[in-house]
Amino acid sequence: MTTSTRETQIVADPDVPLVRITREFDAPPSRVFRAHTDPELLVRWLGPRGLEMRIDSFDCRPGGSYRYVHSDANGEYAFRGCFHDVRPDELIVQTFTFEGAPDGVALEKLVLEDLGNGRTRLTATSLVDSFEGRDAFLASGMETGVVEGYERLDEVLAG
């Protein structure tokens, strides 16, 4: 395991029920994009350490959908959504639903910015329908999953 030198910033917008995540990676946008769209790579980094991941379906194209399951000794946690826009090396727009709270659908946008010298800034936003929903999302432990997941992504990108 390597230790990341990059900080993951997670900010709750005070004006709209949105969470913004910003993170830089020492890899070009093409590699960061591939790690988000290749199921074989995705299972190696998405989510917190200590959870196993299984992908039931993954069709990363406009109109495609996905479903994956994280599991540990306490049970399974399933997530699903639809892809609305996919632009290689720059953008993914999708919905995101935790099946344990099926009414909480988020609209997510992931933007990759080429910083030059083989580096990328990722900015992800997640918009939900209420401040209560956003706060529940933040309270669910998602911060641990995001931070550890991006540390794991650093390891995948370095390999």
Image (spheres, helix red, strand yellow):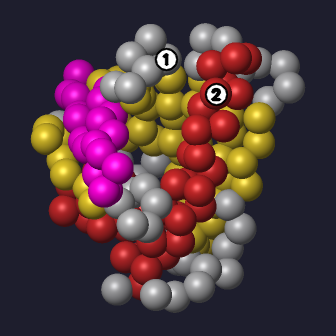
Q: Which mark is residue 60?
A: none
Residue 28 placement, left or right of 79 = right
Question: Image point 30% across, 30% down: which residue?
Answer: 80
The verdict on residue 122 being magenta is: no
In the depicted structure, whether residue 128 falls above or below residue 54? above
Q: Residue extending furthest front?
A: 74
Q: Is residue 64 visible?
A: yes
Q: Position of residue 78 (x, y in %)?
A: 30, 36
Q: Measure the C-alpha gap from mark 1 to mark 2.
A: 10 Å
- Which residue bears the numbered disc 1? 104
Q: Residue furthest left?
A: 56
Residue linked to disc 2? 136
Which-is-in-front pick, marks 1 and 2? Answer: 2
For marks 1 and 2 on the same chain, the one whose residue lies earlier in the sequence: 1
Kindly identify the amino acid type of the residue bearing the numbered disc 2.
Ala
Residue at 39 percent of width and 17 percent of height = 102
Q: Work out whether 145 lies above or below 101.
A: below
Q: Residue at x 43, y 21 (%)?
A: 101
- Say few, some or many: other residues with alpha carbon within 10 Å of mark 1 (under 14 / 14 to 19 / 20 or more): some
Specify start and end residues of the magenta stretch as a single range.
62-81
